[in-house]
Amino acid sequence: MEEQYMNYTPQDFKSDQEVRWCPGCGDHAILNAVVKALPEVSKQLKYNLERYVFVSGIGCSSRFPYYVNTFGFHGIHGRASAISTGVKVANPTLSVWQITGDGDALAIGGNHFIHAIRRNIDINILLFNNQIYGLTKGQYSPTSPLGAITKTSPYGTVEHPFRPGELVIGAQGKFFARSLDVDVKLTAEIMVEAAKHDGTSVVEILQNCVIFNDGAHDYIADRENRDDRVIILRHGEKMVFGKNRDKGLILSGLSLKVVTIGQGGFTLDDILVHDAYNPNPGVHMMLANMEYPDYPVALGIIRNVKDSTYDDNVRDQVLEVMKNAKIKSVDDLLNSGDTWEV
Amino acid sequence: MDKQKNVQELDEVVVRFSGDSGDGMQLTGTLFADASALFGNDVSTFPDYPSEIRAPQGTIGGVSGFQVHFGSRKMNTPGDYCDVLVAMNPAALKANDKWVKKGGIIIADVDQFNEKGYQRAGYKTFDAITELNLQDFKVIFAPITNLTKESLKDSGLDNKSIIRSKNMFALGMVYYIFDRPLSFTEKFFEKKFAKKPEVIEANKKVLHDGYNYAANIQAIPNTYKVKEATTLPKGKYRNINGNTATAWGLIAAAEKAGLPLFCGSYPITPATEILIELAKRKDLGVKTLQAEDEIAGICTAIGASFAGNFAVTTTSGPGLSLKSEALGLAVMTELPLVVVDVQRGGPSTGLPTKTEQSDLMQALWGRNGEASIVVIAASTPSNCFDYAFMAGKIAMEHMTPVMLLTDGYIANGSEPWKIPNMKDYPEIKPPIIHEGTEGYQPYARDEERLARGWAFPGKKGISHRLGGLEKDFIKGTVSHDPLNHQRMVDIRAAKVKHVQYFIPEQQVIGDPEGDLLVIGWGGTYGHLYDAVSEMRANGKKVSLCHFNYINPLPKNTPDIFGRFKKRVVCELNMGQFVNHLRMNFQEFSYLQYNKVQGLPFTVAELVDRFNQILEGK
């Protein structure tokens, strides 16, 4: 009984609710990755099922908590980071997962998102990025590319998009990873690491909206081209990619540069080794910002740095003050300071 | 010291300290109030300050005031008009002379009444007495600044610190006039400046020199004695202001419930002191989260409530506007939550440091959908403790958000408070669901309160999902069923209405029937009480019905209303509570007395109005 956490299967984490996303929606794959990751997280961190809380805001992705058989809270638009923060501070032993989308986290909830990251509260934020507003049927989002034609931008958007990784690192984020909805294995693998990271973990999942923005990520999601257009980063490994594993990244001046191994005098020795644990955000920022066609799109864990967390600091400070406190009860409090008898 | 001066005995006195916002008038007033309370008087205070931290020096806009009413009987208000006004500069005099009783004493720092001082305060002449028509007052022009400089010339303090001490000179003068012991204030210096002995000595010296100066000048012919209050119940007392009492009441509710207190808040005048006080109380395990905005304040609290803490958020009107959507989420998820709204003048940024009661309709109705919540209001600085406690008790036992309304006047005002004992407060027993409860249904309710159970994450076998979408009546899963929605709207309203079976009956102060029933709510209690008492002393058949429970209203309310010929509802807004009463008890007609000047009522204006009503005007 005590070792329940050893024996979960994905099935244990699926709720009895009918999943109502559109057929073909990328969210289905992400749900599969999550229920696949959770038994592994449980095993590694010794978490029983009741320790998990899934919190969301509003949007297609935010229906997620109904579909996992854990504690769940479907909040209001943009506020999931604030709600998760409250859950975690109230009970730091819980494993808190926030499900959010590009509109929920980066538009209406931008403020809460950056402040959760700045505080480094130990929650895992899964950011489903489909570059469109799905639930309201097809308006542009803060990650839609400049010029995107949508229902509210019939002549193309005239605003610059956010790059979630840049925002996360800019807000002093300590953990940022990126995955693709169709790569369930990689997504699940990243989620286990996100759960193990003590502090705010942001996982951007490039997700396809089959109805309103179909194919937005096809240029890298298609099996055909994927290996040439993405690089999967792993800590301590060379930054090599390509179908033939013959391309790599080097530092040229102050920028990253793609080179072909064996051409122009470059050998494997010249290729950068990924250091996700480096506190300096410089290279992480460049990796997070790489865009096709100039660069491969970086997947995997880009940044994974240890630092103190908000929830630990709150708990430690309270315990420390309580240890030396003269006031131990409300009666003590009421009788503290200047008093007099009548 | 000249002991030949006459000593007059008085039952009560009002002193108003006023000066530039950098002159330390709030501290001076607080020290005088504390000294009077420790001496044994009953005390009521009223800080009246501008929203600018340092408005341009010497201007009317920068005048900060602190009024203290002390006496040998129970003090219910800080007093309409003062017996003594301390004016540290021409602007303070010009802004406050209207608050001095005819024949009252005005102590002014003559050193500030120079060309520059007059001009900055917008005088037309260089003669304040004539320009302000102060011939009937005893105006004492004392060289406070220069005497303070003289007093401290050998203190070793820099010039700026010396000039900053002039408020203590003025305080010394007032202590002399009212025969107050200096020891309480000296102790304060010793504690506050424990690491700076030279500052302790300097402050003591200035205080004594001010005291002696007042004793020596002929301009002060009398001193006054205000005896200890003997009508107060025996016991141990302390001073308390409304914001501290609110903070402590919330902690008390958490302690009774056996749950940690979580406060998610964003600083806002005049509510910030609640967050500040709670942040100090880590010794009692209180967790405070200074959120990135008002919305995060309430949303972190909702998250904490879901996770099993007693969660609160504190704010004022503009912040409450921002919290509206999340408050609806708390209604839908039926989680305990206390929202404290320390009301201030509105709309918009309005009058941040001034009092008003104009958030009542927002508290009752300011949400989308049918979203009834419990609304209660504290009515004195010290009973903020009781109503904060009750807000917590109702929120946790009935599984509902509760709005606690206070206002800038009672939040900042202070009074002596007979220290209660926590064993005299009722138990708080939230409907917490135990681990592994068989057949747990998130929205199953108890019959008595109609409250659903509170199931904390982390407990085995009771995992469930809450959210803002409409819930199935039992299972709590998402439901768009039309009849289910009707049923849920009905039961949420009934749950709030049911609270009326758990709150005390409404009381009447005075006879249970008569010619006029004065009706009020919240922070206007002291003024209404004194006005009604004064009229009753004159034989008028007037009673007071003052409400703390606003929604739901106490069951016996119509029985009370029916026993009076007329009813007048008095409030510091344009008629929000009266319309709430009109909705609930349409069978009665109501007169109104409303004021929105950022100030409390005066007893005098209330008595005038009530007399007019009795005379049929």
Image (cartoon, coloured by chain):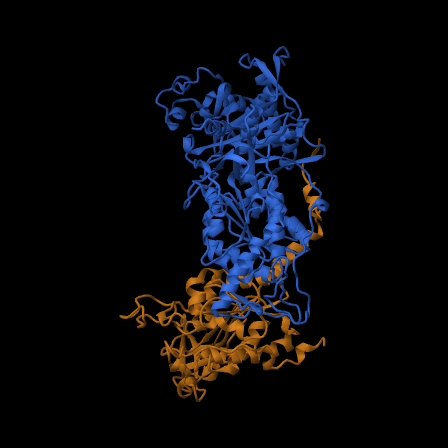
Chain colours: A orange, B blue
Which residue is located at x 44 percent, y 18 percent?
B134
In what quadrant of the picture does the C terminus of chain B appear? Answer: top left
Q: Among all residues in the image, which is located at the extreme left?
A: A155
Q: Is residue A103 above or below residue B404?
A: below
* Left or right: B157 as drawn, with respect to A337: left
In terms of image quadrants, where is residue B210? top right
Q: Position of residue B323 (x, y in %)?
A: 48, 54
Using the rendered image of the protein, determine whether residue B108 is visible from the camera's viewpoint.
no
Q: Residue furthest top?
A: B4
| Pick the front one: A106 or B370 | B370
Q: A31 or B50, which is in the foreground? A: A31
The one nearer the camera, B361 or A160, is B361
Residue B427 vertical position relative to residue A92 in the rendered view, above or below: above
Q: Position of residue B197 (x, y in %)?
A: 64, 33
Q: Residue B150: horizontal and vertical position, in percent?
A: 54, 21
**Looking at the image, can residue B3 be seen?**
yes
Which quadrant of the figure contains the N terminus of chain B? top right
Q: Tell whether A58 sits left or right of A6.
A: left
Q: Residue A231: horizontal and vertical position, in percent?
A: 45, 80
Q: How many marks?
A: 0
Q: Nearer the viewer, residue B126 or B7?
A: B7
Can you say whether A50 is above or below B327 in the image? Answer: below
